[in-house]
Amino acid sequence: MDEQLEYGFATAVFVLEHVAEKITPAEAESMFGETAKENFWRVWPTVRMWVDGLWQRLEDERGAAAMAVEDEEIDEVGGGG
């Protein structure tokens, strides 16, 4: 794995979260310059498709790990005594 790619991704997520915490989408639309808005409009569909794919893979991985066991022999409830 290219560590620079991972670092760049983690940094981008952090920066985007920081921006989202500081201004609303309406404020961004009115405050950001045309170049920033045009670049976002042009690039976002590709980024969103990639992020949705990553999100789904992580959701599947983590969701499966959190699922309850459905085997009566394994999923036995203790009686106490």
Image (cartoon, rainbow, N blue to C red):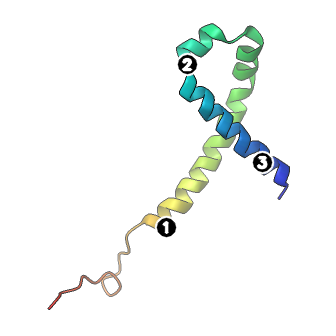
Which amino acid, by three-letter code, is at mark 1?
Ala
Q: Which numbered mark, 1 or 3, is in the foreground of this view? A: 3
Badges 1 and 3: C-beta atoms under 8 Å apart? no
Quadrant of the image for the N terminus?
bottom right
Dividing the picture into quadrants, the one containing residue 15 is top right
For the point 68% across and 12% down, which residue is it?
Answer: 32
Alpha-carbon span between mark 2 and mark 3: 26 Å
Mark 1 sits on what residue?
65
For the point 84% across and 49% down, which residue is it?
Answer: 4
Residue 37: horizontal and vertical position, in percent? 70, 15
Residue 18: horizontal and vertical position, in percent? 61, 31
The mark that comes first in sequence, 1 or 2, is 2
Q: Which mark is residue 7?
A: 3
Mark 2 sits on what residue?
25
Which amino acid, by three-letter code, is at mark 2?
Pro
Q: Residues within 10 Å of mark 2 (few under 14, many from 20)?
A: few
Q: Secondary structure at mark 1?
A: helix
> Is residue 80 placed above or below 54 in the rendered structure?
below
For the point 65% across and 35% down, which residue is it?
Answer: 48
The mark that comes first in sequence, 2 or 3, is 3
Dividing the picture into quadrants, the one containing residue 46 is top right
Q: Which numbered mark, 2 or 3, is in the foreground of this view? A: 3
Residue 33: horizontal and vertical position, in percent? 72, 10
The mark that comes first in sequence, 1 or 3, is 3
Badges 1 and 2: C-beta atoms under 8 Å apart? no
Dividing the picture into quadrants, the one containing residue 28 is top right
